[in-house]
Each structure stands twice: as C-alpha cells, then as structure tokens.
Image (cartoon, rainbow, N blue to C red):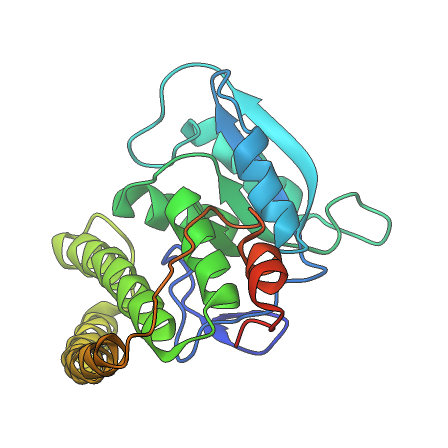
C-alpha cells in the first residue's frame, strides 16, 4: 500500500482512491504529466501550479488514447520503469504523482495506477483535489466529499470487477471481499453525507427566508478558481471572506 507524504493511505492500483479524509495540502509535490496528441494543456498546468505542484517533465504520445492504460502498453511500461529506477539526482527523484491530461475512465485510472504504483490524477481528480483544498463552508465540503466518494466508488467497482473476472491479478477472495467491504462503507457514508447535506440545505433555506423578511439584499459572486472573487468581495464589503 502506497503512502502519500501526509501519511494518508492510497490504495495501490486504484487511481488514487484515498482512505479517510482527503489530503488538502499538495504544496511541494512533484509530478509527471502524460499527454496524448497535441492538446492545449495551459489551463490544466495552471491549475496544477495553483496547488503548488511542480511538473518535472511532460511526456507526449501521439495517437488516440489506449482504453486500458491511456498511453500504449510499452510507453506506459517505460514510465513505470523510469519511476522505479529513481536514484539520488534523478530528475524524477521525488515524483509522487502522475497526471493524465484527460477525463480518464475507471479502467484507465486503474491501469495507469497499477503500472506506475504511485498516485494518479486525471482532470476530474485534479479538480476534486483543488476543490477539496479550497472548500471552506460546510456546504462546499459536503459537496466535494460526496463527489470524491462517488468518483472513488466507480474506480473501486472497476477494480473489483477486474479481480472477479480474472482480468487482473489480485489478492484472491479476501482481496475482493475487502474491496466489496470498502464499497459498502462508501455507500453508507454517502447516505450519511446526503442526509447532512439535506439538513443543511433546509437550515440555509430558512436563513435565506429570514434575511428576505428583514429586507437584506443578497448578492452572489461566481467565477473560476483564482478569478479574484475574494478580492472583489473584500473591495466591495471591506470584510474578509469567512
């Protein structure tokens, strides 16, 4: 079982599925970026840098995505070999994250993670990690936690399916049972979180009604990450964001 530097367990071969609370600080991490074709990666890289993650190398492979491993089998193995041979002074020495510039399928996340044996993010997992880092309100934290668990569940189901069908060398019946137990725990947690979310929504609705009755004016600010919402709020109100 691999470990992140914050000692948060990551299931090996599961595309970065995290056990317990997700890591919120990624400052100082190093990553390699995998790209197929000639896609524009500027926005993706900007988001990565926002989180304090350094991309030490970008690897391209022309052609369409491999449905199992994103990169072709041979090229993905080259990446895995390079990661496993890291020594002092190697450019990838402290790399603990592989980024994929795609909305990867659960099959691809499992395939890449199994090969490289470190944490793997696609575009969806990048955004989930970014939102986890920035979520400050209870409502935001609940939304991000639910989204992450739904994403994790699809990956774990893919892993369980591969082990059940014999497509993937797993840990025998005990390993499959453990995966099923983890999925069941996620389902129970999702039920609990959705109840909290519903209760919070009712309370928020009542507060909005009270503000409306008191004549208070409500203004919403919407924008992309790092668009300057907090700065605009401070300029307009003279108060920091809670």
> Looking at the image, is 237 positioned above or below residue 50?
below
Q: Nearer the viewer, residue 36 or 39?
A: 39
Outermost residue, front side: 215
Residue 52: x and y in percent read 68, 55
Image quarter of residue 194:
bottom left
- 12 left or right, relative to 133: left
Residue placed at 13% from the left, 52% from the top? 165
Residue 27: x and y in percent read 68, 62
Residue placed at 41% from the left, 14% from the top? 63
Outermost residue, right side: 89
Residue placed at 17% from the left, 73% from the top? 180
Residue 130: x and y in percent read 50, 57
Q: Nearer the viewer, residue 147 or 159?
A: 147
Residue placed at 45% from the left, 69% from the top? 135
Q: How many marks?
A: 0
Residue 25: x and y in percent read 61, 69
Q: Nearer the viewer, residue 159 or 175?
A: 159
């Amino acid at each position: 079982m691999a470990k992140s530097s914050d000692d948060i367990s990551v299931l090996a071969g599961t595309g970065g599925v995290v056990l317990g609370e997700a890591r919120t600080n990624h400052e100082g991490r190093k990553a390699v970026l995998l790209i197929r074709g000639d896609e524009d990666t500027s926005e993706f890289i900007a988001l990565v840098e926002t989180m304090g993650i350094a991309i030490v190398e970008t690897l391209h492979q022309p052609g369409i995505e491999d449905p199992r491993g994103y990169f072709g089998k041979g090229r993905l193995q080259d990446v895995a070999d390079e990661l496993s041979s890291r020594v002092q002074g190697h450019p990838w020495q402290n790399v603990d994250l592989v980024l994929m510039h795609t909305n990867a399928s659960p099959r691809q996340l499992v395939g890449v993670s199994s090969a490289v044996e470190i944490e793997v993010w696609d575009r969806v997992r990048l955004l989930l990690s970014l939102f986890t880092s920035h979520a400050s309100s209870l409502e935001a934290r609940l939304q991000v936690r639910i989204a992450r668990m739904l994403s994790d569940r699809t990956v774990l189901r893919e892993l369980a399916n591969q082990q059940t069908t014999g497509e993937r060398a797993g840990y025998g019946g005990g390993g499959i049972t453990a995966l099923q137990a983890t999925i069941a725990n996620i389902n129970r947690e999702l039920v609990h979180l959705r109840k909290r979310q519903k209760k919070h929504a009712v309370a928020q609705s009542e507060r909005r009604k009270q503000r409306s009755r008191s004549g208070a004016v409500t203004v919403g600010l919407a924008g992309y990450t790092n668009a300057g919402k907090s700065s605009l709020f401070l300029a307009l109100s003279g108060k920091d964001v809670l």
